[in-house]
Image (cartoon, rainbow, N blue to C red):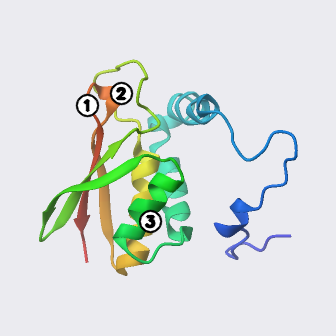
Amino acid sequence: MSIIGQETFSFKDMTLVKRNKLGDKVPLELFRAIRLIGMYEGLPMHGKATTLTIGRTIGEKIEATSVNELLKKFEQLKIGIPSVIEETGKGFRVAIEDCFCEGLPVHAGNLVCDLEGAIFEGALSKILNKKVSVKEVKCNVNGDERCEYEVRFLG
């Protein structure tokens, strides 16, 4: 039973899989359907408020203690292959190769990887012990060659 405000699941709990026949993998098309048909098309404002809340919460629970660990975790979880491509005193820019949206039809003007950015934001805020803002600025679905996020330090 869950008490409001009390943590119910940890990220480590998510690794406990006991599916003897189907195993621990689900198809990418199911994830895409949940994200893009269910949330992006089914919720107001393309589900942005929901994906930000969900993503930040997931990010806070990712077990990483440095930016490099977080980048490795993103690849391990098959979110994508991240790399820092630019650094400034106010933040940095991250490119994501092999993102979940790679290969989808182009819908110019659409950035659909806000959940992944919010996961990054939640994890970074915890790792750096300060507020950060992560904004998707490029997306394969928009016709860009890769997805990119702008990370800004806020406090």
Amino acid under label 2? Val
Quarter assignment of residue 72? bottom left
| Label annotation for residue 132 | none
Q: Quadrant of the N terminus?
A: bottom right
Residue ID at (46%, 48%): 115
Q: Give SS at disc 1.
A: loop
* Label 2 – label 1 distance at C-alpha: 9 Å
Out of 69 and 55, give the one closest to the viewer.
69
Disc on the earlier residue, 1 or 3: 3
| Label annotation for residue 145 | 1
Q: Is residue 134 left or right of residue 40?
A: left
Quarter assignment of residue 146? top left
Disc on the earlier residue, 3 or 2: 3
Quarter assignment of residue 90? bottom left
Out of 151 and 77, give the one closest to the viewer.
77
Out of 9 and 3, give the one closest to the viewer.
9
Q: Give SS at disc 3.
A: helix
Q: Position of residue 33 (x, y in %)?
A: 60, 29
